[in-house]
Image (cartoon, rainbow, N blue to C red):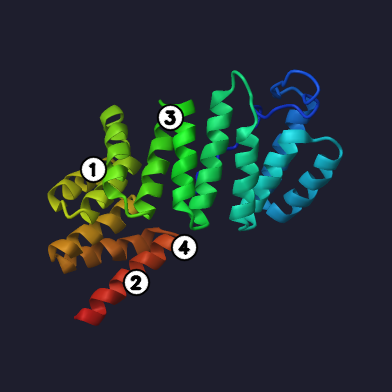
């Protein structure tokens, strides 16, 4: 859930704009079509997209090619390099496109978060939120970065804003439940996770978190049930690994 890559097809600056005013690619432009194709490849074959985007950049692909290179690098696991490229793009002045710059800062921040640099992520997300204060996804991402630094009260501040504006935001409710649990406020954690799972009963993140809350409350059998459900409904990955680790922990203790 950390890496919500924002695909900016149709919203990247034109390669021919450095000597003149900067333009936005439109869906009908040749450059926009090339960009969309590059991004599609980046999702399915990052290495091929990287090679293609490098060649496109040499031909004058400009910012669109650079962004595709960065997204391909994300897919290749080269998070720090991708984050730097996206931040450099966001730092370029682009009057009238605060949403574009905010999106790029957000992408860069999420890459830094995965690379183990949550402090850098907080800095960039703060820049993004300044540009686009109504973007609740950016607030959620910053709350995650704060949590990565152990700054759970700051995380709660961001999540409180989100839940106030969107009471049915399941992701925000789950993250806030986790933050409440981290600061030892289990009653509020339980309220949030109950609300989240009422809205989306089989949300794997929610089930994982409810299991952690139940374990903290001493309800080991109920916690086990939640984690077994995660293993049942989720594809193999970080969530199933976390559920398995927690199951092994309670098995060892017992």
Mark 2 and mark 1 lie on one chain; the one further toward the N terminus is: 1
- Judging by the rendered image, the residue that carries numbered circle 2 is 245
Q: Is residue 32 above or below residue 203?
A: above
Image disc number at residue 135: 3
Mark 3 and mark 4 lie on one chain; the one further toward the N terminus is: 3
Q: Residue at x 23, y 48 (%)?
A: 193
Q: CA distance from mark 2 to mark 1?
A: 26 Å
- Judging by the rendered image, the residue that carries numbered circle 1 is 198
Dot 4 alpha-carbon crowd within 10 angstroms: few under 14, some 14 to 19, many 20 or more: few
**Residue 119: image x %, image y %?**
44, 50
Dot 3 alpha-carbon crowd within 10 angstroms: few under 14, some 14 to 19, many 20 or more: some
Rendering quarter of residue 156: top left
Please state which of the two labelled residues, at mark 2 or mark 1, is closer to the viewer.
2
Mark 3 and mark 1 lie on one chain; the one further toward the N terminus is: 3
Regarding residue 2, the answer to whether it shows in the image is no
Mark 2 and mark 4 lie on one chain; the one further toward the N terminus is: 4
Image disc number at residue 237: 4
Please state which of the two labelled residues, at mark 3 or mark 2, is closer to the viewer.
3
Rendering quarter of residue 130: top left
Rendering quarter of residue 218: bottom left
Callouts 3 and 4 close, C-beta under 8 Å? no
Q: Residue at x 81, y 23 (%)?
A: 19
Q: CA distance from mark 3 to mark 4?
A: 28 Å
Q: Secondary structure at mark 3?
A: loop
Frontmost residue, 115 versus 40: 115
**Residue 194: image x %, image y %?**
20, 46
């Amino acid at each position: 859930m950390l890496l919500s890559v924002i695909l900016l097809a149709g919203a990247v600056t034109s390669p021919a704009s450095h000597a003149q005013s900067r333009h936005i690619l439109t869906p009908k432009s040749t450059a926009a079509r090339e960009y969309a194709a590059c991004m599609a490849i980046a999702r399915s074959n990052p290495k091929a997209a990287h090679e293609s985007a490098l060649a496109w950049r040499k031909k004058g692909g400009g910012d669109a090619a650079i962004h595709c290179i960065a997204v391909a690098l994300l897919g290749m696991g080269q998070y720090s390099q991708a984050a730097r490229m996206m931040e450099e793009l966001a730092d370029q002045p682009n009057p009238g496109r605060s949403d574009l710059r905010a999106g790029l800062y957000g992408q860069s921040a999420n890459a830094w978060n995965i690379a183990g640099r949550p402090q850098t992520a907080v800095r960039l997300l703060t820049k993004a939120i300044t540009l686009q204060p109504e973007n609740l996804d950016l607030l959620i991402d910053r709350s995650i970065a704060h949590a990565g630094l152990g700054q759970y009260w700051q995380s709660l501040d961001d999540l409180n804003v989100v839940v106030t504006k969107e009471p049915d935001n399941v992701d925000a409710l789950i993250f806030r439940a986790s933050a409440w649990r981290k600061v030892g406020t289990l009653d509020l954690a339980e309220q949030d996770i109950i609300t989240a799972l009422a809205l989306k009963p089989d949300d794997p993140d929610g089930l994982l978190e409810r299991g952690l809350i139940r374990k903290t409350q001493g309800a080991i059998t109920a916690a086990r049930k939640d984690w077994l459900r995660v293993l049942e409904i989720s594809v193999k990955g970080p969530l199933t690994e976390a559920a398995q680790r927690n199951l092994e922990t309670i098995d060892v203790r017992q």
